Image: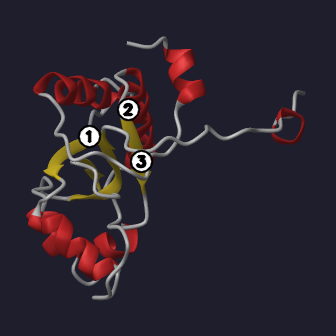
Amino acid sequence: MKDVLQAIKDRSSTRAYTPEKLTDGELTTLLQAALQAPTAANRQEIHVTVADGGSPVLAEIQRELAGGKDTPHNFYYEAPTVLVLSGDSAFHWSAVDAGIAAENIALAAEGLGLGSLIIGCIRGVMTGERGEEFSKALRFPEGYVYQVAVAVGRKAAGKEPHTYDAAKNVTVL
């Protein structure tokens, strides 16, 4: 497994995956990374739903997202596994906590030599007219709502990590 700072440096969003499934060990490592993420007041309120890339509920979410139109890729770019994170709708910090867990998943995936894509684009679908239906289909706990998702699989194409301009993006007081 990669050193964490190297994983941070190397990680980029993956938008092309092979169809090969994750091993049980890889999935266990990703789930441990998610569940070990810190949460506000140690509430540990983030729930992870593991969905196979061929799941009918993911296909239905895609149809809703695309308005019934054909698209060249689905929202998770044909990844073999999608981890959908939900959080307690009554807890103000669930979105932040889910974001931290998503980043842990993405970095663990990179450390394992896997690709990942953090997904926010389905928020409108998950909070829209059919949101409750999708939440039930994804087996969110009672009172939980969609926060973020992470697609994970073996990279079929590479992408250079983003560059940054520290002088523009950092202020030191």
In front of the other: 155 or 3:
155
Nearer the N terminus, badge 3 or badge 1?
Answer: 1
Do callouts 3 and 1 mark residues in contact (Cβ within 8 Å)? no
Q: Is residue 125 visible?
A: yes
Q: Quick check: marks 2 and 1 in contact, CB under 8 Å?
A: yes
- Front tag of 2 and 3: 3
Give the Cα separation between the discs numbered 2 and 3. 22 Å
Residue at position x 21%, y 80% in the image: 130
Q: How crowded is mark 3: few (under 14 residues within 10 Å), some or many (20 or more)?
A: many
Residue at mark 2 to residue at mark 1: CA–CA distance: 8 Å
Tag 3 or tag 2, which sits nearer the N-term? Answer: 2
3 or 1: mark nearer the eye: 3
Residue tagged 1 = 45
The type of residue carrying mark 2 is Thr
At label 1, the amino acid type is Glu
Percent x, y for residue 33? 31, 25
Is 165 drawn above or below residue 64 in the view shown?
above
Q: Is mark 2 on a helix, strand or loop?
A: loop
**Residue drawn at (34%, 22%), measured in percent from left and top?**
112
Q: Name the residue under label 3.
A: 117
Using the image, determine if residue 74 lies above or below residue 116: below
Which is nearer the N-term, disc 2 or disc 1?
2
Three-letter amino acid code at disc 3? Leu
Disc 3 element: strand
Residue 116 percent coordinates (x, y): 39, 41
The x, y position of residue 69, in whole percent, is 32, 88
Callout count: 3
Q: What residue is pinned by disc 2?
A: 39
User: Residue 36: horizontal and vertical position, in percent?
Assistant: 31, 23
| Quadrant position of the C terminus in the picture | top right
Camera-side residue: 62 or 148? 62
Q: How crowded is mark 1: few (under 14 residues within 10 Å), some or many (20 or more)?
A: some
